[in-house]
Amino acid sequence: MTADGSNPLISVQPNALKFVFELEKPSFCDLKVVNNTEHYVAFKVKTTSPKKYFVRPNTGVVQPWDSSVIRVTLQAPREYPPDMQCKDKFLLQSTIVRPNTDVDDLPADTFNKESTKEIQECKLKVFYVTPSSRGNSEDEGFKSYSDQAPDSNSAVQQLKDERDAAVRQTLQLQQELDFLKRRRHRRNDTGFSLKFALIVGLIGIMVGLLLNFSFSSSLSSPAAVPTVETTTSPVEPSTTEGIETPL
């Protein structure tokens, strides 16, 4: 309900903005705006510290019974606030517009309070939380959920066990595949070395046979005897002058 007792045009979830506060790191918070009417509703977001926050979209139109998400980003802070207390506030204005109205078609005085149309406002506070406190709250929420839903936890644990078993089986298959690859590689190397040894052995045997054959042939052939050429000169009949052969 609004301050004047009328039904709200839109509802906002959550009803406060919480930012994880860390130096030199931005943080964001999402707001869900829900249209609770059968009309087109326009909204606009305002803040008391516009330089510290980045709002997108800061203006929009929500169709009947539809919703929209607004992201509010806290710029990276440079120093801690006193006692981690934040005095910043946000204001969400909403009003009914004509059907099929687009955000670019909104008049400049859409959210002007001086106009005759109804403008509803929703104020939102800002809170800073530390990363450790956020982690504790998440752990507590998980514990409460575990207490309320043991069956779901057992189902999740069973799925995790099945996943781990599948991972182990995959690793085992991969190891077996690697072993087979290495074994096949070693077999190929051994075959190559045996073939190479056989070929070298055959070549050695053939060379030995050829050498033995040539050596045997050289021993069986007769030794060459040197020939001496002799020249015979013709003997001419000798004649003796003044000597007569007796008859």
Image (cartoon, rainbow, N blue to C red):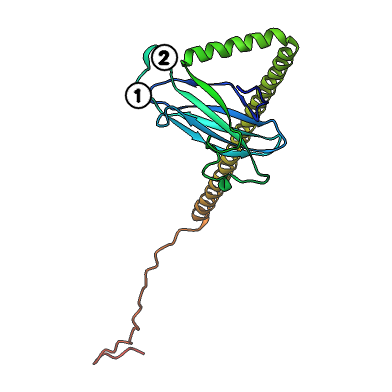
Residue 234 or residue 93, whichever sits in front: 93
Residue type for callout 1: Arg
The answer, for residue 18, to whether it is visible in the render is: no
Q: Residue at x 58, y 11 (%)?
A: 139
Tag 2 secondary structure: helix
Q: Amino acid at mark 2?
A: Met
Pair 1/2: label in front: 2
Provide the residue designation for mark 1. 78
Q: How many marks?
A: 2
What residue is pinned by disc 2? 84
Answer with the quarter of the image where residue 143 lies: top right
Picture quarter containing residue 233? bottom left
Residue at 61% over, 24% down: 13
Question: Where is residue 180 drawn, in percent x and y?
Answer: 65, 31
Residue 130: where, in percent of width, then height? 46, 15
Q: Nearer the viewer, residue 150 or 102?
A: 102
Task: Say which quadrant the C terminus sits in.
Answer: bottom left
Secondary structure found at label 1 = loop
Q: Residues within 10 Å of mark 2 (few under 14, many from 20)?
A: few
Cα distance in 3D space between marks 1 and 2: 13 Å
